[in-house]
Image (tube, rainbow, N blue to C red):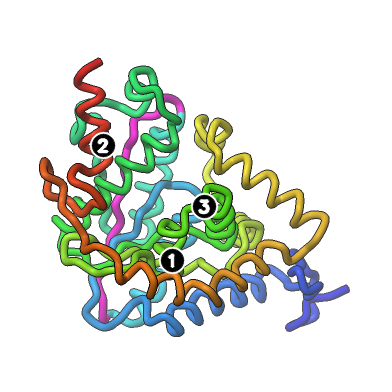
Amino acid sequence: MTCKKCKSEPVFTLISGEKFCKYCFSHYFEKKVRKTMRQYELIEKGDRIAVALSGGKDSSVLLSILAGIWKERKDFDLFAILVDEGIKGYRPLTQKFAQNLCKKLGVKLYIISFKKELGYTLDEMVKKLNKGPCTICGTFRRYLLNTEARKLKANKIAFGHNADDEAQSIVMNLFRSNNAAAARLGVINGIKRDARFIPRIKPLYYLLEKETTAYAYLNGLIGDFKECPYTSLAYRGQVRDMLNTFENNHPGTKAGILSAFIETLPILKEHYKKGKEIAFCSKCNEPTSGEECMACRLLDELKKK
């Protein structure tokens, strides 16, 4: 068998059975990202885009592709933000990779840390709080990314979330009967707009994890480090493993979940738009659904320990 496009030796096979060589697969991948960006108008003239960069393969792939588009178009600004959670033996390696990548691409990188901004590393928080590491991390990462992006005058934050990530979120919300959280998903996160909450965009939305991994490997965007040590403890990890099993046995499962969800998402968003207005935390004034945001509640709990 040969590459569908150029008849060279193939290196990747799509779910459809189509085979691509390195060059044609990279072209297919980038074309799909650009199509999503056009379809949803993710990056417009005059935008100031902050890329949430972790140093992992997904965000590195996203930054690399957006940097290429940025250099072509030159009608929007692009920079990256890395959050140092303080995970011993993991974050220093990914941070170094991210710094090298940004230097290579000519993209400005801003680094913020849990320790400096919140007073604790994630490792310290996990020891003090009776909560899952990923719950703690996700809460504070979202909080810091939003505040830092706003401070740097970004009007959108780009995340490297792919089709696998979204399928996992859809299933998790279904299992938890959390339609309100499901309504906030999609290529552009959120339901209602407010100047204090920076919209989050997902250009890799329709690309599978294995496609992103292949692109990263073929284009030198995978660092020499393992995944976050807390991942195996997460509920998401269990859902990921379940969906991977289904995908292996029934190819197209993840794409099917995404396709069905996209059809119902406008109904969900419209329903929850009618709910109460965005509230603001009584302590930090950040957007929240209640009187006090989760970040401030967790910080209060930490201070009592």
Give the label on residue 202, or none.
1
Marks 2/1: CA distance? 23 Å
Marks 1/3: CA distance? 24 Å
Q: Secondary structure at mark 1?
A: loop
Q: Position of residue 1 (x, y in %)?
A: 88, 73
Residue 225 visible, this orientation = no
* Marks 1 and 3, the one that precedes in the sequence: 3
User: Which of these two is toward me, 22 or 59?
Assistant: 59
- Neighbours of disc 1 within 10 Å: few (<14), some (14-19), many (20+): many
Camera-side mark, 2 or 3: 3
Which residue appears at 30% of the width and 40% of the height? 140
Residue 108 versus residue 304 in the image, above or below:
below
Q: Secondary structure at mark 2?
A: strand
Q: Secondary structure at mark 3?
A: loop
Which residue appears at 19% of the width and 66% of the height? 194
The residue range painted magenta reads 75-89
What residue sits right under mark 3 in the picture? 177
Residue 29 versus residue 250 in the image, above or below:
below
* Marks 2 and 3, the one that precedes in the sequence: 2
CB contact under 8 Å: marks 1 and 3:
no
* Marks 2 and 1, the one that precedes in the sequence: 2
Marks 2/3: CA distance? 33 Å
Give the label on residue 71, or none.
none
